[in-house]
Image (cartoon, rainbow, N blue to C red):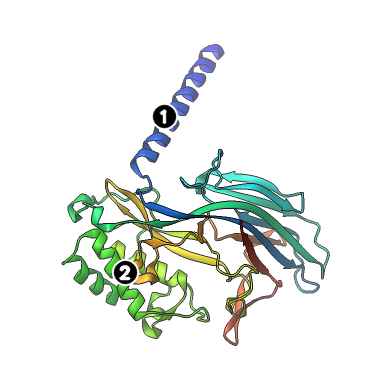
Amino acid sequence: MNMRKRTSGIVLAVLFLLTASYCSKLYAETYPYAPVQASDPKVYRVLMKTRFVVPSSGVPVDQLRVWHALPTKREWSGTDTQVGGTNISWIPATGQKQYERSHGSHHVYWDTTVLHPGRTLYFESQFTVRSQVRVFDPTTSQTTWADYVPASLPDADARRDIHADLANIADRIKASTTPSAAVLEFCKWLSANITYDASVSYPYNDVASVMRNRRGHCAHYAEMLIQLCNRAGIPGRRVFGMNLYAPDGVTGGLQNYRADYTNTHTWVEVYFPRIGWVEVEPSSGEQGFTIPARYIQNNTWFQNYAIWISQKGTWKQPEWLYQNGASVSAYGIENIISYSEQ
């Protein structure tokens, strides 16, 4: 009887592995990236450095966990692993490279309980990443509205409730365009009507405040494009990663608004049936389907880095407090992404 149970268990395990392998292959074939014109190859050496100051008073921090994202592999990455970066290293050496399957996240991870009050801790990771300019030509898309079915894609972001004014805009544009043309029209509307402002205090999903003030940063643009696409029936998802424009990681002024903004970016991918996922820059108007080489995708779990702390056995992410037009951290958090072009 025990042998029969054991044999049955082995058979079920094999069937599970075969099914998982098949589903993984089917998933990759069904939801690919769209073919794009890739040009102007670049190679970047990226350094990410995170600072955390252990509080010297108040509720003590019992445990600290820090994550650094690694690049997502793309066809131009030139790597022989599933990570999009090479020559990966980190300090302190207690860190380890990990893969979180449920989020498709390759990252470096530290976990420490050595937290002396008042001490400043630093966590560094480095990698080399290859990238290219990506251009999708919407005129090559034969996708029609009838190609979309009610079932959502498993890797698309959950549908959002849409702001009433955005709903009217999406309905009007959808009525006179194709799906790919509609996405560009959405980008053109966002570019013309929303002013970039990294100093705003409202969260990325507070579209009502963006519409009222007509100001927001990249995460607001991404959220609004996804809402417009959702209303039209086009699946979308946020893209986390880097926009490498400040080699020293501080030039440009964004550090004045929050000490982890420079070289950080959020944009969008939209899905066209029979074509695949297409990157979109919501703030670029007619050039929305042109993605610069300096845009480096990370996983979809967190943006570049993440910190969690345990206090009295309760885990939380440290909050950023809005003061005098800037967001500050009570834990002295700073995340600087610097790079050199090779």
Q: Position of residue 232 (x, y in %)?
A: 25, 63
Helix or strand or loop: what does disc 1 sit on? helix
Residue found at x 44% / y 31%: 21
Q: Position of residue 265 (x, y in %)?
A: 51, 66
Residue found at x 56% / y 14%: 2
Question: Nearer the viewer's eye, disc 2 or disc 1?
Answer: 2
Which residue is label 2 attached to?
Answer: 286
Q: Report the number of numbered marks.
A: 2
Which residue is label 1 attached to?
Answer: 19
Q: Is residue 285 left or right of residue 307?
A: left
Confirm whether residue 10 shows in the render. Answer: yes
Q: Position of residue 12 (x, y in %)?
A: 46, 23
Confirm whether residue 161 shows in the render. Answer: no
Identify the amino acid type marked 2. Answer: Glu
Q: Position of residue 144 (x, y in %)?
A: 19, 54
Residue found at x 64% / y 52%: 127
Residue found at x 70% / y 49%: 89
Q: Is residue 40 left or right of residue 270?
A: right
Identify the amino acid type marked 1. Answer: Thr
Q: Is mark 2 in CB contact (under 8 Å) with mark 1?
A: no
Q: For the residue carrying disc 1, how many other residues have a C-alpha within 10 Å: few (<14), some (14-19), or many (20+)?
A: few
Q: Which mark is residue 216?
A: none
Say above or below: 293 vs 1.
below
Q: For the residue carrying disc 2, how many other residues have a C-alpha within 10 Å: few (<14), some (14-19), or many (20+)?
A: some
